[in-house]
Image (cartoon, rainbow, N blue to C red):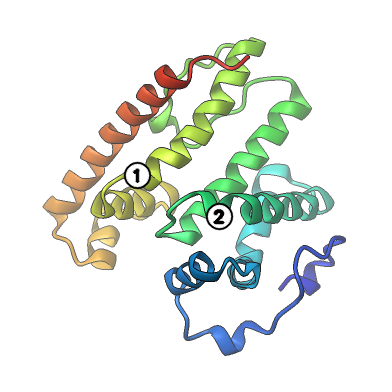
Amino acid sequence: MIESLNLKLAIFPFVKTNRYAHITDLELLELYAADGNSEWIGILLERYTLLLFGVCMKYLKDEEEAKDAVQQVFLKVLGEAGKYKIEYFKSWVYMVAKNHCLMKLRSQQGKYTREINDRFQVAAPEDTKSAHLENEKTYTLVEEALLELPKEQQQCVTLFYLQKHSYQQVAQHTGYSLLQVKSYIQNGKRNLKLSVERKLKERGPLK
C-alpha cells in the first residue's frame, strides 16, 4: 500500500480500495474516461503500488531510489492515462515503470541500457548521445504501438513478453488455442516492429 511505502509526496488522497475490489481495471478506466475524476486512476495506482515498487527495486537496486521512482511513475500515469486507450492497465503501467527505470539508469550511468525487450529492439545500441535519444524515443513509441495492436495480439504479446508467460500459460489464460497464441504473438511482434518503424519515420529524429 502507498502508506506502507512511506512515499514522501501525496500524489492523490489515500482511499480504501477494498470497496472498489469488485470493479475491474477496465471499468475504472471507463469511469475515468467518462468523468475525468483522477480518483479512479488513484485506485488503480494503489492497486498496483507494490508491483511498481518491485519493478523499480529490480532495476534500481536501492529502496529510496525505488520509492522516488514510484512517485515519478504515479505522476506520469496521471498525466498520460487520458491520452491513450488502455485495455490492460497492469501491463501498461508495468511498462511505464520499466521504461522510467531504464531511462534513469541511462542518465545515471551515461551509457546505453537494454530496452524494453531485446526482441522489440529497433535502433542499434550505439554508445552515442544520438543513439540514446533515439532509443528513448523508441521506448515511448513501443508503448503507443502496443496499445494499437488488435485486442488478441495485444493480449498475447503482453502476457508472453511483459509477464513472461509461456505459450501454454497464455493459451490457458486467454482461452485461445496454442496455434492461435503462437500466431497472435508472431503477428503482434511483427506489427509492433512495423508500427514503431513507421512512427520513427513519421516523427523524424529527436532534436
Whole-percent x, y for residue 162 in the image: 44, 49
Query: Quadrant where the N terminus lies?
Result: bottom right
Q: Nearer the viewer, residue 129 or 140?
A: 140
Q: Which residue is at a point 29% across and 52% down the rendered structure image?
A: 156
* Residue 100 as seen in the image, left or right of residue 201: right
Instruction: Identify residue type, mark 2.
Output: Ala
Q: Which residue is at a point 74% across and 20% down the rendered structure image?
A: 110
* Residue 32 as seen in the image, left or right of residue 153: right
Whole-percent x, y for residue 80 in the image: 59, 49
Determine which residue is flagged by label 2.
Answer: 81
For the question of whether residue 127 can be seen, the reply is no
Quarter location, residue 107 = top right
Determine which residue is flagged by label 1.
Answer: 148
| Category of crowding for the residue at label 1, using alpha-carbon neighbours closer than 10 angstroms: few (below 14), some (14–19), many (at least 20) | some
Instruction: Identify residue type, mark 1.
Output: Glu
Query: Quadrant where the C terminus lies?
Result: top right
Q: Considering the numbered disc 1 on the image, is that residue within a helix, a strand or a loop?
A: helix
Look at the picture and state if 185 lies above or below 27: above
Whole-percent x, y for residue 59 in the image: 66, 43
Q: Residue furthest right?
A: 8
Disc 2 to disc 1: CB gap under 8 Å: no
Whole-percent x, y for residue 68 in the image: 80, 51
Q: Which residue is at a point 47% across and 55% down the rendered structure image?
A: 91
Q: Earlier in the sequence, mark 2 or mark 1?
A: 2
Q: Nearer the viewer, residue 35 or 42?
A: 35
For the question of whether residue 28 can be seen, the reply is yes
Q: Considering the numbered disc 2 on the image, is that residue within a helix, a strand or a loop?
A: helix
Q: What separation in Å lies between label 2 and label 1 (alpha carbons)? A: 15 Å
Look at the picture and state if 184 lies above or below 17: above
The disc at residue 52 is none
Quarter location, residue 136 = top right
Q: Which residue is at a point 44% across and 74% down the rendered structure image?
A: 27
